[in-house]
Image (tube, helix red, strand yellow):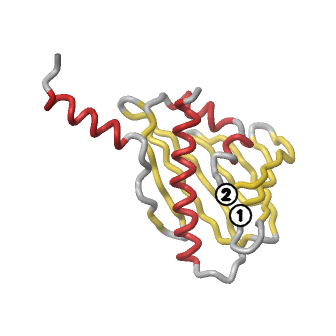
Amino acid sequence: MLPLLTLTPLWAHLALAVEPTAPTVAGANTVSTAIFIAADPATVRAVLADPLRACHLSSDVLEATLVENHGECTLIQITTRGMTSPLTYTTRRCPSADGFVETLVQTDDFDYQASRWSLRPVSGGTQVTLEVRSEPRLPVPQRLINAAVGSSAVQTLKNLVQRVTSR
C-alpha cells in the first residue's frame, strides 16, 4: 500500500487534468486555451477528424453542414449563436501536422474567423491547444467578443474531454 503522501500529488494532478487553462488573448485578438487529456494523440485526433462532430463540440454552434470535400480539406457552413441573431460563415477545415486548421472562406457576418487545434504528445496523454480568432461584424467591443470566445473555447475543450473519454 502506498503512503497517503504519495497519493496526494497524483490525485491533485488528476483533478487538474480535466480543467482547461484560463483563456489568454495574444496578437491579433487570438484567444488560446489548452487542456491535458489522458489519451494518446491518435485517439484525440480521431475524435476531431470528423469535421461536423468537431464543430458540435462547441455549444455555440447551432448548425454545421458539410458543403464539399477538397482532398483532405472540407468546406463547412457553420451557424453560431450571435448577440441578437445567428451568425453564418463557411470555413475550410484542413488537417495539419499537429492537428487541424480552419480558415474563413465566405461570410456576410464576420471580418475574420479562424481556429487551430494543436495536439502535442506529453507524458501520459495529449496536450490540446485551441486557438480562435473571431471578429464578427457586431457593434460590440472586441474585448467582449474575446471574453465570449474564451468562455466558449474552454467549454469546447471540456466537451472534447468528455467525447474522448466516452469512446
- Residue 113: x percent and y percent? 68, 63
Q: In percent of the image, x 75 and y 37: which residue is there?
A: 72
The residue closer to the viewer here, 135 or 87, is: 87
Q: Is residue 166 above or below residue 75?
A: above
Residue 44 at what x, y percent from top left? 55, 33
SS at mark 1 in the image = loop
> Secondary structure under badge 2?
loop
Tell me the quadrant of the picture where the C terminus can be found. Answer: top right
Please give the label number shown on residue 81: 1
For residue 31, above or below residue 20: below
- Residue at 14% from the left image edge and 32% from the top image edge: 5
Specify few, some or many for label 1: CA neighbours under 10 Å numbering under 14, 14-19, or 20 or more. Answer: some
Classify residue 152 by image quadrant: bottom right
Amino acid type assigned to the residue bearing label 2 in the image: Asp
Q: Is residue 123 left or right of residue 166?
A: left
**Residue lying furthest top in this view?**
1
**Vertical relation: 158 (above or below) 131:** above
- Pointer 2 or 1: first along the chain: 2
Q: In which quarter of the image is residue 141?
A: bottom right
**Residue to which mark 2 is pinned:** 60
Q: In which quarter of the image is residue 89?
A: bottom right
Q: Quadrant of the N terminus?
A: top left
Mark 2 near mark 1, Cβ–Cβ under 8 Å?
A: yes
Few, some or many C-alpha atoms within 10 Å of disc 2 (few <14, some 14-19, many ≥20)?
some
Residue at the image point whose x is 77% and y is 66% from the top: 86
Real-space Cα distance between discs 2 and 1? 5 Å
Expressed as whole percent of the image width and height from the top left, the position of residue 46 reads 62, 30
Q: What residue type is labelled 1?
A: Arg
> Could you say which is closer to the camera, residue 23 or residue 69?
23
